[in-house]
Image (cartoon, grey):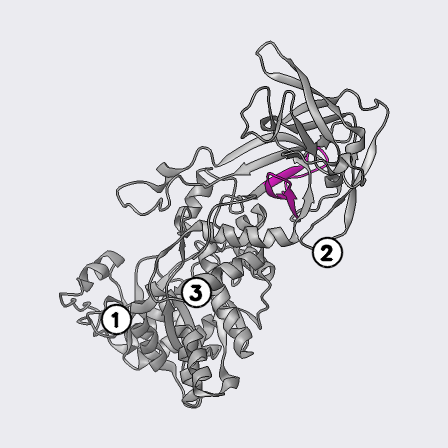
Amino acid sequence: MNNSMEEEEKKSLNFIEQIIEDDLANGLDPAKLRFRFPPEPNGYLHVGHTKAICINFGLGEKYGAPVNLRFDDTNPEKEEQEFVDSIKADIDWLGFKYDQELYASDYFDRLYEWAVQMIKDGKAYVDEQPSEEITAQRKNPFEDGIDSPFRSRPVAESLELFEKMKNGAFDEGAMSLRAKIDMKSPNMNMRDPVMYRILKRPHHRTGEKWKIYPMYDWAHGESDYIEQISHSLCSLEFENHRPLYDWYLDQVYEENTVRNKQREFARMNVSYMITSKRKLQRLVAENAVSGWDDPRMPTISGMRRLGFTPTAIKKFIERVGVAKRENLIDIQLLEFFVREDLNKISTRVMAVVDPVKLIIENYPVDVEEWLETENNPEDENAGTREVPFSRELYIEREDFKEEADKKFFRLKLGGEVRLKSAYIIKAERVDKDENGEITTIYASYDPKSKSGSGTEESLRKVKGTLHWVSAKHALPIEIRIYDRLFTTPQPDAEKETDFMDFINPESLKTVQGFAEPSLKNAEIGKHYQFQRIGYFTQDRDSSGEKTVFNRTVTLKDGYKPE
């Protein structure tokens, strides 16, 4: 490889890849590369997690290195098996394979033993102060903290109390184990952080065994070390935790083992979405949405139910890139990649969202035709299917006007349009109800104008083409039109306002429509383009009594990514 090619390849690396390349150049054995994705099972994964997932698993694929899925399950108050199962399902849906499924709780015994050794080494002590006093004594980055009155407690006393804490001898909040580091450090994380707290709650995996649980900072880095993770990659808010991460590693590191390296990347914020689990929980608890997998939610399960694809999400993450500075990504960029992928894979069908009856008066009453139509013109292997045509049809109400100007290219009285894959028709008259609303449109058709018949009339050009559904064969469907959950791009940007105040009351509209009969055999999760309307997927709420489709995205958008 010449120098110019090497320079070009170096420029194409993101800063994390460059760190890894530098480590390899400095002697790191490629066989010792190992990554992990470490979610806490206290909620469903959201759009922000997709970045961390794609970074870690992407590096695993790039370097042929294993990637662990490790659940940082150190807080039984908020963690549930339901969340574990959903996280595994999300990663599987995205198409990533992890090397091992592991849990921080797998290491509770070892973490406890290490903590005991730290007490023996004079680097940890049991503190009997309430958490409020501990926080107050830490002061602020510009003022030295105050030592705990228990900081010089004899080792033997701390060892005895710590064992009693483990055995459940004390009430919650009565005492904690703290690392003895530096109460004058400008980094507040280093001011004698709590390592263990008393928590008498059952754990979803260890049951009633433990009465104390390790704090995240203590368990997380040591779990990385136990698993010999070479590069611990996390979001930017953990940057000032890195000195503590390294200090904890110093206490357990042994020669000839991999020394973990923590590095941070910017979180991904997407407009009209929130990624705080606490706030997502509130949306669910206050019934602003139907659940964690509501299609309006920014969770991976919500996006999957809405009809987003793994390919689109991965391309979106690739385009966003890996950065050191946070910024707001336009949701339209994500929808652009969704639309681009759906165009390639979606079966084209005809459905009517707001139907009005159309009767072709000169079409035979007792005749029906089955017209051949392409499943997907973007995929030559997608094949064709037959769609029924008859005298009575449904068309979109907005596709007809009694009177219209020259810029209206759909159906109007006295005007002609082509019915897709069928005939040219002309609107003749209408029926209306007592409120003046049109109930039926009457039309005539040109029998020689059938699409694909090769006649001169079939080649005649008209300006409008309409989709339709045969009334006799129509499948009633429930159509859910989803829009942004919030009315503002950053609903949680202002501390003075409640993000719930920006809930969009028009984020879900449910209408009753009709579809061609082929959708009787639709599969949940399969993608369809309702021609001239948008992209849809069948929802899991479908049953023998009703068929439900969710709108994923509109058919077109003026957005073009830079």
Q: What x and y, as percent, mark residue 56?
A: 49, 70
Lower position in the chain sequence, tag 2 or tag 3: 3
State whether residue 116 is above or below residue 440: below
- Residue tagged by mark 2? 380
Specify the farthest residue to the left: 143
Q: Nearer the viewer, mark 2 or mark 3?
A: 2
> In the rendered structure, which amino acid carries the disc numbered 3?
Gly
Q: Mark 3 — residue?
A: 321
Earlier in the chain: of badge 1 and badge 3, it is 1
Q: Residue at x 61, y 39 (%)?
A: 532
Crowd band around label 2 with a 10 angstrom C-alpha radius: few (<14), some (14–19), many (20+)? few
Please give the name of the residue rendered at 44% of the width and 78% of the height, measured from the top-left corner.
Answer: 8
Please provide percent x and percent y for residue 234. Answer: 40, 67
Q: Nearer the viewer, residue 271 or 131?
A: 271
Residue at the outermost right position: 366
Disc 2 and disc 3: Cα gap in Å? 33 Å
Q: Residue at x 26, y 42 (%)?
A: 496
Q: Amino acid at mark 2?
A: Glu
For the question of whether residue 222 can be seen, the reply is no
Can residue 362 be seen here? yes
Q: Which residues are magenta?
A: 527-550
Q: Secondary structure at mark 2?
A: loop
Residue 257 or residue 425, whichever sits in front: 425
Disc number at residue 190?
Answer: 1
